Structure formats: C-alpha cells, structure tokens
Amino acid sequence: MIGGRGPKRTLRAAALWAQEWHAITRSPAEWLELRSVLLERCAEVGRDPAEIACSVNVRLDDGIEAAAEEAAAYGEAGVDVVVLNLPHRAGPDLLEPLADALIRSGSAR
C-alpha cells in the first residue's frame, strides 16, 4: 500500500509499485481528481490501473448517517475500500447502528 496524494512523486510511486493506493481526501470529487492523476501516471509507466485497489478514510465526525452517505458516495466514485475512522473510546454499541446505516446507504457490500 502506498498512501498519499502528491501528484508527481507519490502517485507515480503508486503507479509503479502499489497493490493499493490510499488517499486522504475531503470529498469524492477531490478523490476523483487525484484518481485521474493516478490514471495518467499508470499510462506513463505502462501499468493497468485495475491492478491497484483504491482506499480512503471516512470519519464519523458528523454522525453515523453522514459517514454512511459519504462512504456510499466514495463507492459510487469508484473507491474499492472505505476505512471508517471511529471516534476515540467508541464502544461496541456503535457498531450495530453504523452497520445499519451503511446497509441503508448502499455502501455495505
């Protein structure tokens, strides 16, 4: 896994060597912009971008429903894996409502 968003060095390194590229972005639209750069870097080095899984982080800062909707939006944009960042000291009681919200949003596969 190569994580980062630098258009010259990081995304070129991801195009060359990554099995997975992980980007921290503010929105699916921003991720799509970075993904297009990764596609360019793959073309430059002769790599099939389908060989590189893509992942992002989604935080629960704005609540469970908002995080589930954001995860679904990333999935629609083409992200393969969404890593949900739970709040510090989150208890197990958070997991069932989170799973339900992810199912409702269509982001749970």
Image (cartoon, grey):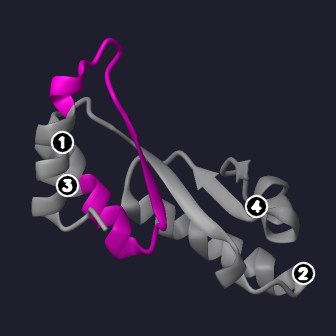
Gap in angstroms between the C-alphas marked 3 and 1: 6 Å
Task: Tell me: 76 left or right of 56.
Answer: left
Gap in angstroms between the C-alphas marked 4 and 1: 32 Å
Q: Earlier in the sequence, mark 4 or mark 1?
A: 4
Mark 4 vs mark 1: in front: 1
Residue drawn at 11 percent across, 40 percent down? 97
Highlighted range, magenta? 70-94
Mark 2 vs mark 3: in front: 3
Amino acid residing under circle 4: Leu
The reply to whether the C-beta atoms of the residues labelled 3 and 1 are less than 8 Å apart is yes
Could you say whether the residue bearing mark 1 is in a helix, strand or loop? helix
Q: Nearer the viewer, residue 44 or 74?
A: 74
Residues packed near mark 3 inside 10 Å, few (<14), some (14 to 19) or many (20 plus): many
Residue matched to label 3:
102
Amino acid residing under circle 2: Val
The reply to whether the C-beta atoms of the residues labelled 4 and 3 are less than 8 Å apart is no
- The percent position of residue 23, horizontal first and vertical second, equals 58, 51
Residues packed near mark 1 inside 10 Å, few (<14), some (14 to 19) or many (20 plus): some
Gap in angstroms between the C-alphas marked 4 and 3: 29 Å
Task: Tell me: 24 left or right of 1.
Answer: left
Gap in angstroms between the C-alphas marked 2 and 3: 37 Å
Amino acid residing under circle 1: Leu
Residue drawn at 80 percent across, 70 percent down? 15
Gap in angstroms between the C-alphas marked 2 and 1: 40 Å
Could you say whether the residue bearing mark 2 is in a helix, strand or loop? helix
Q: Earlier in the sequence, mark 2 or mark 4?
A: 4
The reply to whether the C-beta atoms of the residues labelled 2 and 1 are less than 8 Å apart is no
Could you say whether the residue bearing mark 4 is in a helix, strand or loop? helix
Q: Which mark is residue 45?
A: 2
Residue drawn at 78 percent across, 79 percent down? 42
